Image (cartoon, rainbow, N blue to C red):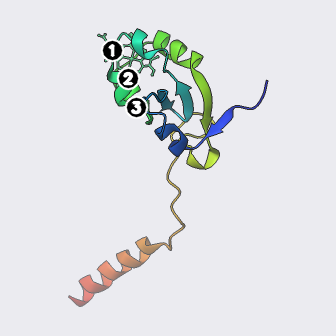
Amino acid sequence: MGELKQYKRADVASRNGQNNNPVWIIYKDSVYDVTSYVSQHPGGDVILEEAGKDATKAFDDVGHSSDARTILDKYKIGEIVEEEKLYDASGKKKKRVIAAQPDTETRSCLNKCTCGLLG
Ligand code: HEM
């Protein structure tokens, strides 16, 4: 039992099913090699459109069953490196970290009042 293999999004991008490359997809920061599943997919070749990409949205938009998720699990080969993850440990989408900004709210409010008074 080793640690899960870590991949960068760029590593996955080259496994796009073209030129005999395998078909890897990303689903919620996990990496799956679904090469052998493509021909069994009830939804057909659409899977290939997501090859090498983050298929999270496409997968969820279809409203796949929990069976589909169980199948997906079987093909997991690793996960996205920490710094490129989009979800936190609890599976929630990470908020973009915005550098702390000075509180401009009070000032602009003050400006409005002052201008209001002057104008
Ligand atoms: C890569 C892992 C995937 C797995 C394991 C998977 C699995 C399945 C399974 C088991 C079904 C049958 C219905 C169900 O149980 O929900 C299904 C249907 C379907 N899938 Fe996927 N799927 C995958 C990816 C995708 C992606 C990326 C797309 C879209 C781009 C997609 C589009 C569809 C569509 C449109 C159907 C409906 C087919 C129909 O009912 O005629 N699937 N998939």
Identify which residue is drawn at 48% across, 9% down: 67
The response on whether ligand 1 sits within 8 Å of label 1 is: yes
| Quarter of image, res 58 | top left
- Cα separation, mark 2 vs mark 3, equals 13 Å
Disc number placed over residue 18 in the picture, else none:
3
Q: Amino acid at mark 2?
A: Ile
Residue at mark 1 = 44
The image quadrant where one finds the N terminus is top right
Helix, strand, or loop for circle 1?
loop
Q: Are marks 2 and 1 in contact (CB under 8 Å)?
A: yes
Label for residue 47? 2
Across and down, in percent, residue 47 comes to: 38, 23
Dot in front, 3 or 1: 3
* Rendering coords of residue 69 (x, y %): 50, 16
Q: Secondary structure at mark 2?
A: helix
10 Å crowding of disc 3: few (<14), some (14-19), many (20+): few
Cβ at disc 2 under 8 Å from ligand 1: yes
